[in-house]
Each structure stands twice: as structure tokens, then as C-alpha cells.
Amino acid sequence: MNPQLDPTPDHIMQVGLGFWASKALLSAVEMGVFTELANGPEEFNDLAGRLGLHLRSARDYLDALVALGFLHRSGEAYSNTPATDFFLDRHKPSYIGGILEMANARLFGFWNHLTEALRTGRPQNEAKEEGASPFTTLYADPARLKGFLAAMSGISHGANLAIANKALWKNYATYADVGTAQGDLAVQIALANPHLAGIGFDLAEVGPIFEEYAETNRVSDRVRFEPGDFFTQALPRVDVITMGHILHDWDLKNKKMLVSKAYDAINPGGALIVYDAIIDDERSKNSFGLLMSLNMLIETPGGYDYTGTDCMGWMKEAGFRDAHVEHLVGPDSMVVGLK
């Protein structure tokens, strides 16, 4: 079949009704399906009962998760796949479900207003009516803040591991993760590089959550929290500054301001590492990065994702002598600027 001459609606229908599969997975994470099955297979009646599923839809739901590739079934027994067991069991350090929990609780509803966002250019989240920064709303509620920071770790963990294991760290002694959130990047760098001393820099409300995470990972002797606001204060003076999923939150003026502040704070010979779901220069391949940019429309007054060429330009404008792009994992890449 020539798809140009004989088109089919398969892809259109798959994407157009993609929210069916999405919500099936998000509800499974919400109900703890994969955590429940972490100890091994369970028979249908036992599993449905423990999850509190109504029998009218329980079998269809669990079998849908099988068909979608999130569960295995043998006879009447259901079990996790290797991927869901590793990434979606809440009790494992590899759990990435925080971002899915946030998607379920917040983003799923906000994205229902994408058309309005596209026509108005205004956020559609908690700050929609007040016009305040979404971070003001999130940081005002300790429970919501902790969930948000865990979500940031979930979406960032793979890239954080990749960055932590880069060879460039052997040339440096100190680093600061700016906008550190729960602190997963700062922690992973310390775990992979015992010679380094690091700082997590973020608003004061984040401090206890960061310190708990560093203590849990046994790096609190080399990684400390420094409270601060990167809009009003200088950044810590160190060899390397990292910014993970930070620049895309802001408009062009503030993107350039943050890159410039990093340049001023970095020791001579040091580096700035920025990473996001960097959009390919042709703006046609990294669909996740482009959709993440639309998520910034939903979530922020001026944020958007960007290409590697864009970011390298901001770095060179700030004074960095060289800059390059390196792929990390999945849709994420980093841009490294050398001072």
C-alpha cells in the first residue's frame, strides 16, 4: 500500500482518542495498580477487590492494561511488566510516577482548555484567574509543593543520571543546581562523583524537601541547600552550574537573564549545563519537546521550549566562549557552555 495514494485513518484515530489510553494508565498509577503487583502476580478477583474496582468494568480495565502493554496476564493472574515494575512501583527508588500523578491531578484537566490557551496566549492552570505565577500557587501549599517536586524528579531522573555520569565532571570540584526542586540532579551528580561538593539552589520553601532527599541518598555531607531567588539574587559561585527543566519556564528576556547570571557566577574555565526537551533545529522530529512547549503555554505566562541553536546563541551572547549540544535520554538533550 502506498500511504500517499491509499491513506488510512489509523494514526488520526490513535492520536485523536489517545486520551483513552492515557487516562487508563494515569488511573492505574493513581490507584497503585503496579505497586500492588510489585510482590508478584494476583488472581483477578483478589486484584479487583484490593483495588476497589467495580465488577462491571474491572476485567475490561485490567485487560485494557494488558493490551496496552502495561500488564501481563497468565490465565486469571495479572502481573507487572519489567518496565512497570521498575518505574511505577512507588516503593522503588526508580519510581517515575510522580510526573504521572501530577498529570492526572492537574494537567489532564488543564489541557482540556488548550484551544483557549492557543487563542488567548494565557495560562490555563491554577493561576488562570489570579494572573499570578503558577509557582506562587504551588509553593504556597506544602503538600502540593512536595508532589510537584517529586514529579520533577520523575520526569528528570533519566537525564539526571546521564548528566551525572558525563566525563566532564573529572575536571571540576564544585557545582550548583539552580532551581534544584527535590534535588535529584544534585544528588545524582554527587553519587556518581565522590570528589565533588554541590549546592542545591531554590526558594526557601524547598529546603526541607531537598535536605530530606539528600539525607535519604546519603550525600548530605557533600550536598547542601542554599535558599535564594534567582530573579533577585546572585547565583552561587562554583565551577559548574546546572539548570534542568528551568529555562523553558520563562520568556526570552528571563531566559537570557538566567544564562547571563550563570556566566557571572561560574569560575573561569567552568561550565553551564542547561537541559530540557530540546527541540530539533528543523522543529519537526522532537514531538515531545514541541508538546512540552505547549504545556508551558498551559502552565506559564511566557515560557516555551527551544532549539539547541537558540540556547547556544544565548550562551555566546552572555560571553561563553563555546557551546555545544549533547543528547541525553529520550527527548532530553543538554546544552553545555564553556567559560
Image (tube, helix red, strand yellow):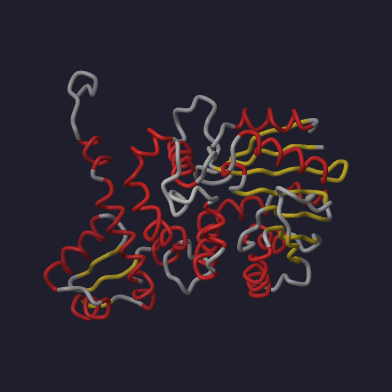
The percent position of residue 298, horizontal first and vertical second, equals 44, 44
Q: Position of residue 313 (x, y in %)?
A: 68, 28
Identify which residue is drawn at 56% across, 57% down.
136
Residue beneath the point at 49% across and 71% down: 92
Quadrant the C terminus occupies: top right
* Horizontal arrangement in the rendering, residue 235 relative to residue 145 (left or right): right
Residue 160 position by quadrant:
bottom right
Nearer the observer, 10 or 320 = 320
**Is the residue 172 above or below the residue 325 in the image?**
below
Q: Is residue 275 left or right of residue 120?
A: right
In the rendered view, tell whether residue 339 sits above or below residue 179: above
- Image position of 330 (left or right of 2): right
Q: Quadrant of residue 226?
A: bottom right
Quick check: 31 left or right of 131? left
Between residue 199 and residue 44, name the one nearer to us. Answer: 199
Percent coordinates x, y for residue 135 in the rendering: 56, 55
Q: Residue at x 27, y 80 (%)?
A: 50
Seen as rendered, the residue at the extreme left is 56
Where's residue 283, x and y in %?
A: 48, 28
The number of discs equals 0
Measured along the vertical axis of the image, is residue 293 above or below residue 137?
Answer: above
From this viewpoint, which residue is outermost toward the top?
5
Task: Please identify the residue farthest to the right as the structure is shown.
Answer: 268
* Residue name at image x 28 percent, y 64 percent: 72
Quadrant location of the N terminus in the rendered image: top left
